[in-house]
Image (spheres, helix red, strand yellow):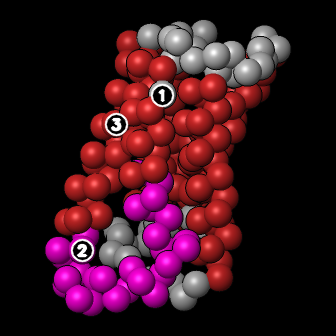
Amino acid sequence: MNTLILGLVLFLGMHAIAIVAPAWRDRMAARMGEWPWKGVYSVVSIIGFVLIIRGYSTARGVAPLLYVPPEEMRFLAVGLMLPVFPLLFAAYLPARIKAATKHPMLLATMLWALAHLLSNGSAADVLLFGGFLVWAIADRISVARRPPRAIRTAPTRLINDVIAIVLGLAVYAAFVVWLHARLFGVPVV
């Protein structure tokens, strides 16, 4: 569990800097330069992500069970996951979905984490999915309060919504049918 916790601290900690210390983040980016700062941010985030994967895969089998979700929660989780991949694509293909949700990736993260908390009850699950859920909610609140940053994305076009939905549903179907079982050892259906 220590590896999972360290990974979460590194990954979510880097991603929480804009929430808890935006002025410090701006000073560091100005002092180091924007690209070197992004390099440090990326390296620490990647290390954290790798530790999360290794730590969760190790802890998943030995972590104590905190609760046993009812079987029906699995079906709710499958339903909550339906918009997740289209929202992820919409974050990079701006159109009406992105405009309506403001921050589709944060919404996707919240739905992903909630769905997995509803269907998994070990301490490792609560740490992983609960940590991401708390971070995504805090970041969504923070984003609404801080000045927007200019982020380069694809041009805004209505076709982007169609692409996000079609690609997202295709990836969702692949995960439901075989990818989730193949990557994580847990079949969805």
- Residue placed under numbered mark 3 in the picture: 51
| Residue 159 in sight from this viewpoint | no
Q: Nearer the viewer, residue 105 or 10?
A: 10
Q: Specify which label sits upstream in the sequence, 2 or 3.
A: 2
Q: Nearer the viewer, residue 12 or 103?
A: 12
Q: Position of residue 38 (x, y in %)?
A: 25, 70
Q: Residue at x 55, y 73 (%)?
A: 20
Relative to 27, is 164 on the left or the right? right
Looking at numbered disc 3 in the image, what kind of residue is underneath it?
Answer: Leu
Q: Secondary structure at mark 3?
A: helix
Q: Which mark is residue 37?
A: 2
Q: Position of residue 32 (x, y in %)?
A: 20, 83
Q: Specify which label sits upstream in the sequence, 2 or 1.
A: 1
1 vs 3, front mark: 1
Q: Specify which label sits upstream in the sequence, 1 or 3.
A: 1
Q: Quadrant of the C terminus?
A: top right
Task: Give the magenta-colored segment's residue range.
Answer: 11-38
Q: Residue at x 48, y 81 (%)?
A: 22
Q: Residue at x 55, y 36 (%)?
A: 128
Q: Position of residue 72 (x, y in %)?
A: 81, 16
Q: Position of residue 24 (x, y in %)?
A: 41, 83
Q: Nearer the viewer, residue 4 or 149?
A: 4
- The secondary structure that dominates the magenta segment is helix
Residue 182: image quadrant is top left
- Residue placed under numbered mark 1 in the picture: 1
2 vs 1, front mark: 1
Query: Is 18 part of what is drawn in magenta?
Result: yes
Classify 146 as above or below 55: below
* 1 and 3 marks in contact (CB < 8 Å): no
Residue 157: image quadrant is bottom left
Q: Secondary structure at mark 2?
A: helix
Q: Secondary structure at mark 1?
A: loop
